[in-house]
Amino acid sequence: MSHLEERMEKDLNYIRNWLWKIGDSVEAALRSAKTTLILKDNKLANEVVLGDHPINRDSRQCDRLCHTFIARYLPGAGALREMASTIRVNVILERIGDYAVTICREALQLDTPLPEKFSARIDSLADDSIDILSGARSAFREGNAERAIALMDAVKRMESRMDGFYDELFAEDDRMDATTMMVIFAVFNIFKRVGDQAKNICDQTVFAVHGVKKLPK
C-alpha cells in the first residue's frame, strides 16, 4: 500500500468513526427522550433539547470532512459512493436527533404521566425502532448489504403492527383529554419516522456497496 493509500484509508476510518459517534449520540438522545416521556422527567427533557446542539455541530463537521476527502483524493467509485452515502446518512442522523428534541417538547406539554397502556406501547415501539436504527448503522459501517435488506423487512413488520396501536388510541377518544391524545399520536408518528429513516440508511448501505440507488418495491 502506497503512502497516499495509507493516508486515504486513515482519513476514511476517521470519517467512519466520526459518523459512528454522531449515531451513538442520536441513539442516546432517543432513549433519553423515551425516558422523559414515560417517567415525566422534565429536567431530562431539557437536557436532551440542549444536547442537540453538539450533535448539530458534529454533523456539520462530518459534512466538511466528507467534502474535503472528496476534493483531496478524487476517490474511485467505491470510496466515492461511500462518501456520498455518508453525507446522506449524516443528514438522516441529524434529523433523527431533531426527532428526539420533538419528543421532549411533546412530553413537556403533559401535566400527568401517560396512561399505563400507552406508555407500554410507546416503550415497546421506541425500543424496536431504536434497535432497527442501531442495526442499520452497523450494516452501513460494515458494508453489509444483506443485513441492510433484512432490516428493511423488519421496518415493514414494525409499521404493520402500528395499525393496531392507532386503533387502540382512537378507541380512547371519549376517555382521554385532547392534549394527551395528540402527544401520544405525535410520538407514535415520530418513532415510525425513526424506522423510516433507518430504512433510508439501509438504502444507502446497498448503494454504497452495490451502486444500486434504491431497491424496487
Image: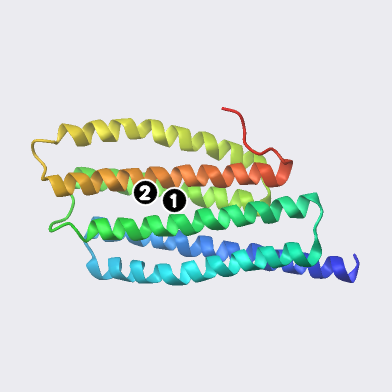
**Distance between mark 1 and mark 2 Cα atoms:** 6 Å
The x and y percentages for residue 175 are 8, 39
- Numbered mark located on residue 217 in the image: none
The x and y percentages for residue 182 are 21, 45
Q: Residue at horizontal 72%, vertical 41%?
A: 211
The x and y percentages for residue 214 are 62, 36
Query: Residue placed farthest to the right in the image?
Result: 2
Q: Residue at horizontal 64%, vertical 51%?
A: 85
Q: Residue at horizontal 38%, vertical 55%?
A: 99
Q: Residue at horizontal 60%, vertical 42%?
A: 203
The x and y percentages for residue 59 are 54, 65
Indicate the quadrant containing the C terminus: top left, top right, bottom left or bottom right: top right
Q: Secondary structure at mark 2?
A: helix
Q: Which residue is mark 2?
A: 126
Disc 1 and disc 2 in contact, CB within 8 angstroms:
yes
Q: Secondary structure at mark 1?
A: helix
* Res 73 → quadrant: bottom right
